[in-house]
Each structure stands twice: as C-alpha cells, then as structure tokens.
Image (cartoon, coloured by chain):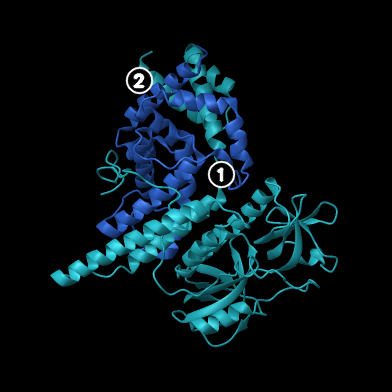
C-alpha cells in the first residue's frame, strides 16, 4: 500500500477510535493493514491520553487574564502621538531615563522580595509593590483578577510557612471556608483552629478573610474571621433585574441589596459585594461613585462576623485590605516585577509567518 | 465565543470581549505549550506572552485576524521555537523556591510522574518541528484535519501525510533501543 493511502486509512481509523469504537473493531475492518495500523493507532491513543491530562493552573490563568486586560486598558488610554519641540523632546528623554533608573531599582528590589514570606525583612516591600499594582489597576475586571491572584499568593505563603515550620507568625489571607466538625475547618485549604465563639457552620461556603497566627502543626490560630468584601468601582454597562454588569464584572442583585440612587447604563458607581462562587459576586450596597477619601472611609467599615476576639494584628491584618480606589494608569501585569524576563524572544515578525491565520 | 474573525469589539479592545477571548483560548494555548515544553512555569509565562502579543497586534495594526485560534497557536509555536533555540530565557531559581507557589494541581503532578509522559516527551523532542507542531495541534486541540490544514497553511492531504509520518516517527522513537 502506498504511504499516502496508508495516511488516509490511518486518519480514518484514528477518527473512529477517537469516536469511541474499540481498536480491535476498527482493525477488523482492515485485516490486510492491521499490522501496520495497530502501532500507529496505539501511539496516537497514547499521545492523546497524555495531552488530555494537561490542565492549566487556575491562578496562572487568572494572572494572565489580569495582565492581559490591564495591558488592554493601558493601550485604550494611550494618547495620540504628538510632535515634540526639541526642548520638550530632550526633557522627555531625560524623564524616560530617570524613570528607567527608578524602575530598575524597583524591579531588583521586587525580585528579591518576591519570594519573601510574612516575617521576612523584605516582606513589606513585596506587599508595597502589590498594593501599588492594585492601586494602579482601575479596570474592575482586571482588579478583581489581580485581587484573586494576590489572595492565592497569601494562602500559598501560609502553606509555605507551615512547610518551613515557622510558627507564631501573624498572617492574613482569604479563601473559601470549607470543612466539617468531624474533619476540621479550612480556608483556602489552610487548616484553622477556631475560637470557641465561632459557629463555623454559619460560614461554610463563604469567601472569608482570616487573620491569625501560624501554629507548629501547620494550622492557623484564628484571631478574627470575616466575610471578604470587594469594592467595585466602574461604569454600569448593563442593568438586569437580578444582575448588573459593572466594568465587565457581573454582580448579582438580591432583594436585600441596598441601592442608594437611581442608576442606569452609563452611570459611574461604586458597590460593595461578597463573593458567592468562583466567578460570582453578590452586591450588598450600591451608590454613586465616591471620591477617594470617602471610598477609603467606606472600605475601613468592613462588615465582620463576631468572633469574640478583636483583631489584634495591626500589621498583616490590615494591609491585606488594599482596595484603594485607583483612577490612574494601569500597570500591565501583576507578576512580581523582574521575576521573569524575555530576552530577545521577539521573532522578526511577531506574527505567525507560516500560517494564514491572519490577513 | 467562537472568534473566527476580528470583530470591532476586539480591535476596540473591549474588555468584556477580550476577557471572554482569554477565557476561551487560554486553556488551549496552555495545553499546546505544555505538550511541547517541560517547564510548567515557563509555559504559563509563554501563554501570557501569547495574549499580550495578540493585544499588540490588535492595537498596532487594527487589522483583521481571520482565525484567532490559529493566530494564537501560531504565535505559541514561534515562542516554543524561540525557547528551543535558547532565545527565550527566564531566570532559574532552585525548585524549593517555587514549591510554595504550586497550586497542587494533582492532575499535572500525576502526569509528570508518569513514565509514559516522560517517554513521549523525550520522543517528541526527536521529531522535526513540523511533526511536533502537527501532533501538538491534533492531540491537544482536537482540531479537525481542515482546521489543522488552515493553521499550517497546507492542504488536507499534506496534513494527513505529515501526521502519519509524525506518529510513525514517534512510535519508532518510543520503541526500546
């Protein structure tokens, strides 16, 4: 049989196997070529099975999404190119050079601090960089993606502290509350030691903010636990009876949601929401977009469930609440600055040059 | 969302449409990269880079893309080739430094621990670039022959022959020496 014909036959048989027909049944239809086809079909099956096991990391996907949308936001607001006078041009060049020097220093520090954990000397630097990234991300969807990534990072840090046996360290992190009385309770996969006053059943399934202290057994002794509140500021894009879309984020509306004003598409608003699922939010209160000082005041008044023990952690507990309203330029990406770099990876033409995927 | 041409919302960088596009295609781009490259974090970096390049293209050229998935996978292929040629580098740090960042994706860990997977990956590296590309497209994307042909800018028959030779070469490299 000519190789070309065998190629056609292989494709035909491979398709049948992919559709669920047993290999032996397929081969029985072509007994004269079964010997040649069998190893090919088995190799193809092996290749497909292994490919099917590849699952992207959710946090990495969210990080990429936030970076993608932040870069898009920045491009949307790029000013039109203007002709500069010589003096202005020289000033601009000097300004760019100064910024480059500042950014380089910032990136090097960021690189070193990126791996730091709570209690490390450089940890405040890492948090300051993250806070700046959040503050500079004004697009609501990008901002939520960034906050989600940072929430993941906080819980990874707690797990890393446990793996390294670093107990008695103040920590603050967020995640879905889960577990049972029999198996113990967790938030973001971190085992919790809860004060007796807490009724964990009331929190089951909620997305919570936890403040506490690491213990030798890898769990966290909780000092306070509250529903994690999200502040979303943006333009109303769609109003439906049970759901609004604000800046690309879909937020559920309940009969109990306090709507302070009459809003319609195009209005600029601020809302406070809780997270009810992986990509689901429920609005608690909606109002006109607040000026920055008022927004800060709103954010400081976070709702919390009574724990019987006040949050005595002034450092790590408070700096996780970073929903500073930001209306300035976005920062593309939220990865630790300087952590990775592309070096000369740009192809001569960064478009696929060997396919017809674009005009 | 099945974006086969560039709608105005994309060239206008509409965040909702871009978000939908990322949600739909990121897993496909990542699977392609991960099938061809060993380093999980490198693949995550490259997947993010693919989307940033799409953005740059939309912003700079304002031109139509007739097949968004094809464009993304084509760019992913370029980045893989750059990586294999040593053009793309990322700083290496001890594994222990990244352990705490792992999300505990057991499926991938299981995969990594699989001897079969190591053998297939090693055998894949011995194929030509086109052979690796066609197998990664067909194994990870479940593309039809016609789609693969469109992406690789070849005839359906040429793809059939290339695929057959690629699988045969993979089989030979998987045989015990």
For marks 1 and 2, give the CA distance: 48 Å
- Residue A356 percent location from the top left of the image: 28, 43
Chain bearing tag 2 is A
Q: Chain of mark 1?
A: B
Judge depth for marks 1 and 2 and give the one in front.
1
**Labels 1 and 2 within one chain:** no
Q: Do residues under tags 1 and 2 come within 8 Å of each other at their CB atoms?
A: no
Residue occupying image coordinates x 24% and y 65%: A94
User: Color used for chain A?
Assistant: cyan
The part of the image, by quadrant, that contains residue A243 is: bottom right
Q: Residues within 10 Å of mark 1 (few under 14, many from 20)?
A: few
Tell whether B83 sits left or right of A244: left
**Secondary structure under the numbered disc 1 in the rendered image:** helix
- Using the rendered view, name the quadrant where residue A302 is placed: bottom right
Is residue B15 shown above or below A305? above
Dot 2, crowdedness within 10 Å: few (<14), some or many (≥20)? some
Closer-to-camera residue (A228/A352): A228
Residue B145 x/y as whole percent: 39, 35
The answer to whether residue A145 of the structure is visible from this angle is no
What is chain B's hue in the picture? Answer: blue
Using residue A148 as the reference point, say whether residue A158 is left or right of it.
Answer: right
User: Could you tell me if residue B46 is visible in this image?
Assistant: yes
Element at badge 2? Answer: helix
Residue A283 percent across, percent down from the top left: 61, 75
Closer-to-camera residue (B83/B5): B83
Query: Is residue A106 positioned above or below B93 on the image?
Result: below
Label 2 belongs to which residue?
A: A4
Identify residue for label 1: B98
Depth check, front residue: B23 or A116: A116
Q: Position of residue A273 (x, y in %)?
A: 61, 73
């Amino acid at each position: 049989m000519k190789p070309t014909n065998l190629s056609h036959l292989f494709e035909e048989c491979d398709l049948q196997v992919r559709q669920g027909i047993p290999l032996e049944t397929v081969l029985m239809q072509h007994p004269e070529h079964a010997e040649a086809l069998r190893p090919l079909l088995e190799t193809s099956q092996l290749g497909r099975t292994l490919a099917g096991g590849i699952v992207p990391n959710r946090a990495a996907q969210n990080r990429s999404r936030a970076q993608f949308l932040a870069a898009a936001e920045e491009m949307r607001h790029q000013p039109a190119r203007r002709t500069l006078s010589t003096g202005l041009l020289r000033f601009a060049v000097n300004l760019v050079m100064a910024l480059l020097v500042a950014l380089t220093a910032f990136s090097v520090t960021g690189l070193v601090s990126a791996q730091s954990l709570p209690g490390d000397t450089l940890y405040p630097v890492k948090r300051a960089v993250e806070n700046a990234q959040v503050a500079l991300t004004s697009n609501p969807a990008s901002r939520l993606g960034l906050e989600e990534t940072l929430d993941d990072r906080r819980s990874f840090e707690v797990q890393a502290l446990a793996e390294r046996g670093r107990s008695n360290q103040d920590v603050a992190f967020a995640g879905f509350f889960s577990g049972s009385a029999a198996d113990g309770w967790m938030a973001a996969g971190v085992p919790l030691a809860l004060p007796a006053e807490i009724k964990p059943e009331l929190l089951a399934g909620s997305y919570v903010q936890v403040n506490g202290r690491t213990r030798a057994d890898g769990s966290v002794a909780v000092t306070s636990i509250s529903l994690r509140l999200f502040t979303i500021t943006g333009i109303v894009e769609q109003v439906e009876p049970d759901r609004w879309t604000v800046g690309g984020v879909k937020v559920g509306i309940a009969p109990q949601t306090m709507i302070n004003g009459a809003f319609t598409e195009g209005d600029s608003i601020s809302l406070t929401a809780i997270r009810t699922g992986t990509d689901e939010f429920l609005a608690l209160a909606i109002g006109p977009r607040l000026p920055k000082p008022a927004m800060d005041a709103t954010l400081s008044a976070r709702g919390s469930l009574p724990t019987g023990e006040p949050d005595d952690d002034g450092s790590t507990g408070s700096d996780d609440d970073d929903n500073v309203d930001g209306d300035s330029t976005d920062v593309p990406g939220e990865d630790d600055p300087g952590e990775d770099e592309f070096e000369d990876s740009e192809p001569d033409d960064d478009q696929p040059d060997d396919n017809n995927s674009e005009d | 969302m099945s974006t086969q041409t560039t709608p105005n919302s994309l060239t206008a960088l509409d965040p909702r449409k871009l978000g939908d596009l990322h949600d739909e295609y990121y897993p496909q781009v990542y699977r392609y990269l991960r099938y061809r490259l060993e380093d999980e974090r490198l693949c995550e970096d490259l997947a993010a880079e693919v989307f940033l390049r799409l953005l740059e293209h939309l912003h700079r050229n304002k031109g139509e893309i007739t097949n968004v998935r094809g464009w993304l996978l084509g760019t992913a292929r370029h980045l893989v080739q750059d990586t294999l040629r040593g053009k793309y580098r990322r700083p290496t740090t001890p594994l222990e430094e990244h352990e705490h960042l792992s999300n505990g994706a057991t499926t991938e860990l299981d995969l990594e621990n699989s001897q079969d997977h190591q053998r297939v990956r090693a055998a894949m590296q011995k194929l030509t670039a086109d052979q690796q590309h066609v197998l990664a497209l067909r194994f990870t994307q479940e593309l039809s022959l016609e789609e693969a042909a469109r992406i690789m800018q070849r005839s359906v028959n040429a793809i059939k022959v290339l695929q057959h030779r690629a699988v045969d070469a993979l089989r030979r490299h998987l045989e015990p020496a």
